[in-house]
């Protein structure tokens, strides 16, 4: 079968002919229909320091996909050939304390599809059946192919009560943009998002942001927006989705006393902050990893079925033979989600 492989330990991605995976007795084999490119795939493409430490090249990458079951292992129950599915890309051990307690997203032995085990940028992928998620009616294939990052946005955004609250999102990457729509859907009042990229801030406006602020321009500032919107005391909830130290500091400045922050963006280890902002304001911070299995998946699919519209985030579509164009546009920063059709 065709597959996109990190074939060599250097920048790039290559189309190769590889064996169709053989599903074990607890696995399902899925014929992949659509995939999406994640920021992680770009890190792997670029072969940055993290990828060199983490990804065992050669390896088929990719973890955002939708497809159809074509084979079911002998021990699998609840799935059948023909089911339309995506899958949770974090494969967990099943025996650690958190797995045992039903908190699989906190498994200390997690492996990632397309990161340290064979991924979905291929005609077929085999996954443990416990990781599969059947796609409910009314959710398109295209939307189903981005449930993984929508799940990151959902897990982060629904960490704290948003009803009637003012929400600040730092970072208008695909995940930040989707978080705007979720905060709106969940009943927030003002949803303000910051970035340094106008293309992405425009997308955020299409997703329903009250204000999309370019913090790199002299006329764009978060404190200015607070004043303009008449919010005298600052934001109630912050969703950090950039991984940028300055964005995190902007957020600490802009949060009201007693505010809540969910941190999805991965800050560099040396990020320094003004600790008095956290301590004297009594802020509550929560780190977010992945998606809750499978509470996040149920929540996001129910929101999609009840009117959550994330369609503006999908900006580009390519046939798989044009994969290089997909990676190029994603690397340019001038894109939302990029779909590759198999
Ligand atoms: P992305 O890199 O596409 O988006 C980050 C955005 O932050 C970019 O648009 C960038 O221009 C913007 N940014 C840069 N400097 C900024 C500043 N000073 N103020 C505001 N915005 C600024 O990433 P993404 O795919 O949308 O993911 C968001 C973040 O979440 C990334 O840091 C990613 O690594 C992280 N992530 C974490 C998990 C997890 O499980 N914790 C999962 C997926 C992604
Ligand atoms: Zn575990």
Image (cartoon, grey):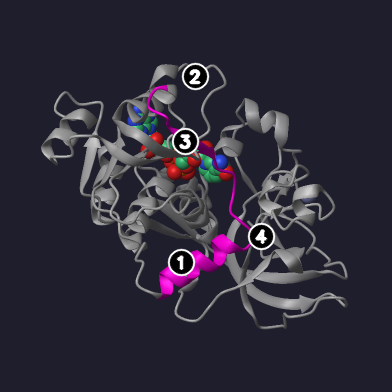
Q: Nearer the viewer, mark 3 or mark 1?
A: 3
Question: Considering only order in the chain, which callout, 3 or 4, is on the residue closer to the N terminus?
Answer: 4
Q: Secondary structure at mark 4?
A: loop
Q: Secondary structure at mark 2?
A: loop
Task: Say if disc 1 is inside 8 Å of ligand 1.
Answer: no
Question: Considering only order in the chain, which callout, 2 or 1, is on the residue closer to the N terminus?
Answer: 1
Q: Quadrant of ligand 1?
A: top left
Q: Nearer the viewer, mark 1 or mark 2?
A: 2
- Kindly identify the residue that appears in the image at 87 percent across and 67 percent down: 24
Q: Position of residue 164 (x, y in %)?
A: 28, 54
Q: Nearer the viewer, mark 2 or mark 3?
A: 3
- Kindly identify the residue that appears in the image at 54 percent across and 16 percent down: 270
Q: Nearer the viewer, residue 6 or 212?
A: 212
Instruction: State the separation of the CA atoms marked 3 and 1.
Output: 32 Å
> Is 275 above or below relative to 33?
above
Q: Residue 143 shows which numbered tag?
A: 1
Q: Quadrant of residue 67?
A: bottom right
The range drawn in magenta is 280-305
Q: Quadrant of the N terminus?
A: bottom right
Q: Nearer the viewer, mark 4 or mark 1?
A: 1
> Is 90 above or below relative to 294?
above
Q: Are marks 4 and 2 in contact (CB under 8 Å)?
A: no
Q: Quadrant of residue 187?
A: bottom left
Question: Considering only order in the chain, which callout, 1 or 4, is on the residue closer to the N terminus?
Answer: 4
Q: Nearer the viewer, mark 4 or mark 3?
A: 3
Circle 1 residues within 10 Å: few <14, some 14–19, many ≥20: many
| Mark 2 lies on residue | 271
Q: Nearer the viewer, residue 310 or 168?
A: 168
| Mark 4 lies on residue | 122
| Mark 3 lies on residue | 284
């Amino acid at each position: 079968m065709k597959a996109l492989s990190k074939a060599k330990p250097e920048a790039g991605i290559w189309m190769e002919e590889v064996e169709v995976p053989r599903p074990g007795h607890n696995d399902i084999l899925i014929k992949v229909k659509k995939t999406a490119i994640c920021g992680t795939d770009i890190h792997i493409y670029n072969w940055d320091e993290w990828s060199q430490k983490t990804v065992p090249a050669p390896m088929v990458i990719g973890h955002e996909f939708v497809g159809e079951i074509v084979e079911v292992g002998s021990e699998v129950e609840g799935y059948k050939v023909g089911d339309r599915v995506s899958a949770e890309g974090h494969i967990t051990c099943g025996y650690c304390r958190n797995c045992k307690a039903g908190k699989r997203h906190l498994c200390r032995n997690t492996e990632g599809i397309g990161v340290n085990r064979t991924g979905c940028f291929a005609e077929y992928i085999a996954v443990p059946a416990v990781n599969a998620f059947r796609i409910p009616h009314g959710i398109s294939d295209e939307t189903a192919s981005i449930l993984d990052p929508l799940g990151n946005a959902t897990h982060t955004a629904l960490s704290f009560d948003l009803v009637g609250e003012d929400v600040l999102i730092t970072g208008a990457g695909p995940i930040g943009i989707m978080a705007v729509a979720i905060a709106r859907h969940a009943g927030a009042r003002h949803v303000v998002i910051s970035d340094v990229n106008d293309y992405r801030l425009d997308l955020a406006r299409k997703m329903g942001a009250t204000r999309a602020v370019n913090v790199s321009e002299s006329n764009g500032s978060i404190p200015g927006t607070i004043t303009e919107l008449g919010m005298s005391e600052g934001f109630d909830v912050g969703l950090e989705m950039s991984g940028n130290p300055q964005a995190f500091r902007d957020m600490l400045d802009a949060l009201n006393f007693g505010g809540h922050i969910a941190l999805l963006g991965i800050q560099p280890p040396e990020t320094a902050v003004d600790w008095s902002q956290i301590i004297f304001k009594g802020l509550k911070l929560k780190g977010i990893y992945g998606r809750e299995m499978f509470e996040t998946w149920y929540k996001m699919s129910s929101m999609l079925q009840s009117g959550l519209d994330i369609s503006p985030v999908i900006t580009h579509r390519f046939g798989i033979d044009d994969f290089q164009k997909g990676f190029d546009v994603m690397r340019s920063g001038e894109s939302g989600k990029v779909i590759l059709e198999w």
